[in-house]
Image (spheres, coloured by chain):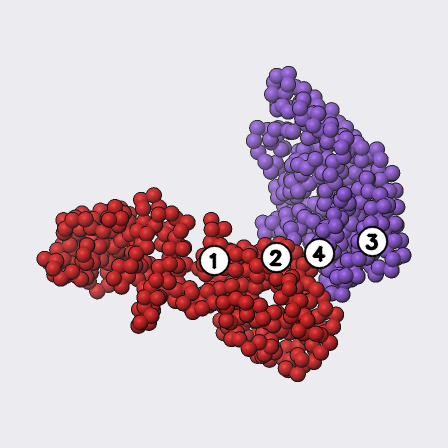
């Protein structure tokens, strides 16, 4: 057996997906596939179902901490524990527990503890209470006075699970929760070089959405360094979203026409409406069924209720704006946590900062928006956008 | 074929300098501090080269401290002189300084040094008469830029010296001459300037060398300690071949100072004439009094857009200060000239070298005309 040779295991608990009744197997299989994909860079790491949980087998030459860090990117995981499998009976369990606590107590700080035992294998000769009591007294004998029992509020919990084998572990590391990516279909993220859109993508991915992204490039107004930055952001996102298509629209000639033919105070709104139209139309040829933006209510002039109505009204697909009620500070905190912040704040102008209305209308009516576009051939511009899209695949491997 | 018009960022070495550099590199790559003959050969080359470098600036070789570049020279002058003073130090800098000066000034300020800004006049030059001297702490050092890296405006150093001599005779004067050296005659001994910072790659030497020319080097605290080279002021093995190549490039620049200035003036005129002829809308941002080799000029499109479009055609110009690392910040030198931030974002810097010619400027003007027509509505 493969697993028996691998002493290092990680126990992965899944939460929400258990609630999904008959779909459970689909969810589990998707999660396992996503975990395998995320762990592929580590080489021979195994991921197997183990009753209602998942066991990850880590070979000796791979760091368990790094595996756990990687799995924290995989949505659907509720918590993780580095685990030791006890080969042999109760004596072996005692040895393992003593070994594990010796390392921990090396710092000489006194701690309280308790033992929690879960006995699934009812043929095991000792009951769960007996295992806890017996192991507890062995540990106190060995480590007193550094270690003392406190069953109500202990500093640490020693956990034993008796199944077909005996498992021993101490830590429970929280996972990212959410749903496995891919369970909720696919969505098209309007990705810019800013702080918000990668976070919006993260939030939708956490609800099981597979992501594609679309970026509107306005060279030479924005430099190719911005495109490179968008690629970098996308690559960071593949850690939690899986491999992702990036569609790059050459938007310059459209943008130029807009700035020539539209009133300056409506330029941002009209530009966003064109982006939404092109993105929705392009989506017809892909698996995505919704658009995702990083908009947050009131953050800038184009993100008022009226402006959102004006930009959202040109498409009929769902438009997800997961940051709509999120404070900027919280968005920044999330961006830092998912690792996109440092890249997002690189100081290159993107088209949102180059092509801005000097005094944008903050409360445009739908009529005003339509009026601002009356000199444009919308269909021709949309087709022009669609003709100038190049697509590339961003992969987790490129992060390594 | 590319057209290089960003000599204020760096002036690539001529073939002559490169050939000589290759040659001395193959013969003199020894440690000048070594006792043996090879080391002595390297030391002799350095001595000879520093003699010639010093004489180009009317200085003595003892006054020349070799550094890694202009930034280090400036750091050495400001940090090495201002901090160790006994009384509360006070540094005067102009509003048009390069980041190398402003960043050090900010650092010193955090350490308790008082920093006062000298406003610029309408020609973009420091106007020292605007500094109130009746009250407060006397300045320890006055640091001004010799020629603005943004506009080419040339500071009237004599007016700074006269003001110092009259009001604060104990203050020393540091001139950031990075853009002035090799473009303007400099007579260090004949002036009352105390420190001069220089950067070799601006006058066509290979990159990696700068100089601090100092009258009061005994009062300097070294930034870099080690085996005590250069009288303990700047430790680290000296680079004989690089110093020699630098001397050659400098001599060439100084020998053709007037010719180069005349060429730059003619090219600037050509640029203005051709743009006018072609009906390209533009505003000359550089003041009339500026040195002609740096032309700050604005067009009705974003500076960075123009730089990219021209770059795609192999024409290389600068956008503001190339050293500022792509950051968008309010441009002090331009705002002093009454240029609003909108116009400053539309300003580019075209800087000529001795080998540029009229045909290149005509090609530049043609490319600008096309860029403004195609992208110039924003």
Would you name the residue on which mark 1 appears?
A243
Work out whether residue B166 can be spotted. no
Please report the residue visible at 73 percent of the width from the left and 60 percent of the height from the top: B302
Please report the residue visible at 67 percent of the width from the left and 67 percent of the height from the top: A384
Front in this rendered view, residue B285 or A79: A79
SS category of the residue bearing label 4:
helix
Q: Position of residue B272 (x, y in %)?
A: 87, 53
Please report the residue visible at 67 percent of the width from the left and 19 percent of the height from the top: B41
Front in this rendered view, residue B351 or A181: A181
Label 1 neighbour load within 10 Å: few <14, some 14-19, many 20+ = many
Chain B appears what colour? purple
Would you name the residue on which mark 2 appears?
A226
Q: Position of residue B299 (x, y in %)?
A: 79, 59
Work out whether residue B229 can be spotted. yes
- Relative to B33, is A386 above or below? below
Mark-to-mark CA distance, 1 and 3: 45 Å
Which dot, 2 or 1, sits closer to the camera?
1
Q: Same subunit under labels 2 and 1?
A: yes
Mark-to-mark CA distance, 4 and 2: 13 Å
**How many numbered markers are drawn?**
4
Which dot, 2 or 3, sits closer to the camera?
3
Would you name the residue on which mark 4 appears?
B304
Which dot, 4 or 2, sits closer to the camera?
2
Would you name the residue on which mark 3 appears?
B366
SS category of the residue bearing label 2:
helix
Looking at the image, is mark 2 or mark 1 earlier in the sequence? 2
The chain holding disc 2 is A
């Amino acid at each position: 057996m493969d697993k028996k040779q691998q002493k290092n295991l990680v126990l992965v608990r899944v939460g929400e997906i258990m609630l999904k009744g008959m779909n459970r197997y689909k969810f589990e299989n998707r999660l396992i596939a996503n975990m395998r994909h995320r762990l592929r860079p580590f080489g021979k790491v195994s991921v197997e179902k183990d009753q209602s949980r998942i066991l990850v087998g880590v070979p000796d030459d791979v760091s368990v901490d790094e595996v756990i860090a990687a799995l924290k990117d995989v949505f659907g995981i509720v918590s993780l524990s580095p685990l030791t499998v006890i080969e042999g009976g109760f004596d072996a369990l005692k040895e393992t527990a003593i070994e594990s606590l010796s390392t921990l107590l090396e710092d000489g700080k006194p701690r309280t503890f308790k033992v929690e035992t879960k006995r699934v294998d009812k043929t095991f000769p000792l009951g769960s209470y007996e295992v806890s009591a017996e192991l507890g007294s062995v540990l106190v004998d060995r480590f007193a006075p550094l270690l003392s029992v406190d069953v109500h509020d202990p500093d640490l919990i020693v956990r034993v699970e008796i199944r077909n084998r005996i498992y021993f572990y101490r830590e429970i590391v929280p996972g990212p929760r959410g749903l496995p990516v891919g369970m909720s279909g696919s969505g098209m993220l309007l990705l810019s070089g800013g702080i918000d859109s990668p976070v919006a993508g993260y939030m939708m991915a956490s609800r099981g959405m597979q992501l594609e992204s679309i970026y509107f490039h306005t060279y030479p107004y924005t430099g190719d360094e911005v495109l490179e930055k968008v690629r970098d952001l996308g690559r960071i996102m593949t850690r939690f979203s899986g491999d992702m298509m990036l569609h790059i629209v050459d938007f310059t000639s459209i943008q130029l026409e807009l700035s020539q033919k539209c009133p300056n105070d409506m330029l941002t709104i009209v530009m966003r409406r064109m982006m939404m139209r092109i993105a929705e139309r392009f989506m017809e040829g892909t698996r995505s069924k919704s658009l995702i933006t990083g908009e947050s209510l009131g953050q800038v002039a184009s993100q008022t209720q009226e402006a959102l109505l004006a930009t959202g009204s040109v498409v009929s697909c769902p438009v997800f704006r997961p940051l709509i009620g999120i404070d900027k500070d919280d968005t920044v905190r999330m961006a830092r946590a998912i690792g996109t912040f440092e890249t997002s704040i690189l100081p290159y102008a993107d088209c949102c900062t180059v092509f801005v209305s000097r005094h944008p209308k903050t409360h445009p009516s739908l009529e005003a928006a339509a009026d601002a576009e009356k000199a444009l051939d919308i269909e021709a511009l949309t087709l022009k956008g669609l003709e100038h899209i190049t697509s590339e695949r961003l992969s987790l491997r490129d992060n390594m | 074929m590319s057209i290089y018009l960003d000599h204020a960022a760096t002036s690539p070495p001529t073939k002559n300098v490169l050939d000589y550099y290759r040659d001395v590199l193959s013969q003199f790559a020894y440690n000048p501090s070594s006792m043996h003959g090879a080391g002595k050969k390297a030391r002799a080359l350095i001595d000879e080269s520093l003699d010639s470098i010093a004489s180009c600036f009317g200085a003595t070789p003892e006054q020349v401290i070799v550094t890694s570049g202009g930034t280090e020279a400036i750091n050495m002058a400001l940090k090495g002189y201002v901090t160790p003073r006994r009384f509360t130090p006070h540094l005067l800098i102009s509003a048009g300084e390069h980041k190398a000066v402003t960043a050090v000034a900010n650092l010193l300020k955090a350490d308790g040094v008082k920093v006062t800004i000298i406003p610029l006049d309408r020609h973009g030059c420091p106007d020292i008469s605007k500094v109130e001297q009746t009250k407060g702490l006397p300045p320890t050092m006055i640091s001004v830029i010799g020629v603005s890296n943004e506009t080419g405006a040339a500071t009237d150093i004599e007016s700074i010296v006269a003001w110092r001599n009259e009001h604060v005779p104990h203050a020393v004067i540091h001139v950031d001459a990075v853009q002035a050296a090799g473009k303007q005659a400099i007579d260090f001994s004949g002036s009352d300037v105390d420190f001069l910072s220089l950067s070799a790659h601006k006058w066509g030497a290979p990159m990696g060398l700068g100089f601090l020319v100092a009258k009061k080097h005994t009062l300097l605290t070294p930034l870099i300690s080690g085996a005590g080279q250069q009288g303990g002021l700047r430790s680290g093995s000296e680079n004989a071949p690089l110093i020699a190549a630098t001397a050659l490039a400098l001599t060439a620049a100084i020998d053709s100072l007037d010719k180069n200035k005349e060429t730059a003036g003619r090219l600037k005129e050509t640029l203005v004439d051709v743009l006018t002829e072609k009906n390209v809308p533009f505003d000359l941002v550089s003041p009339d009094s500026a040195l002609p080799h740096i032309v700050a000029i604005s067009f009705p499109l974003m500076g960075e857009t123009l730089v990219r479009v021209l770059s795609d055609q192999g024409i290389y110009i600068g956008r503001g200060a190339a050293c500022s690392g792509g950051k968008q910040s309010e441009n002090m030198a331009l705002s002093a000239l009454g240029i609003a931030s909108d116009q400053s974002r539309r300003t580019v810097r075209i800087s000529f070298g001795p080998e540029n010619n009229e045909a290149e400027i005509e090609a530049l003007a043609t490319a600008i005309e096309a860029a403004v027509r195609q992208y110039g509505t924003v």
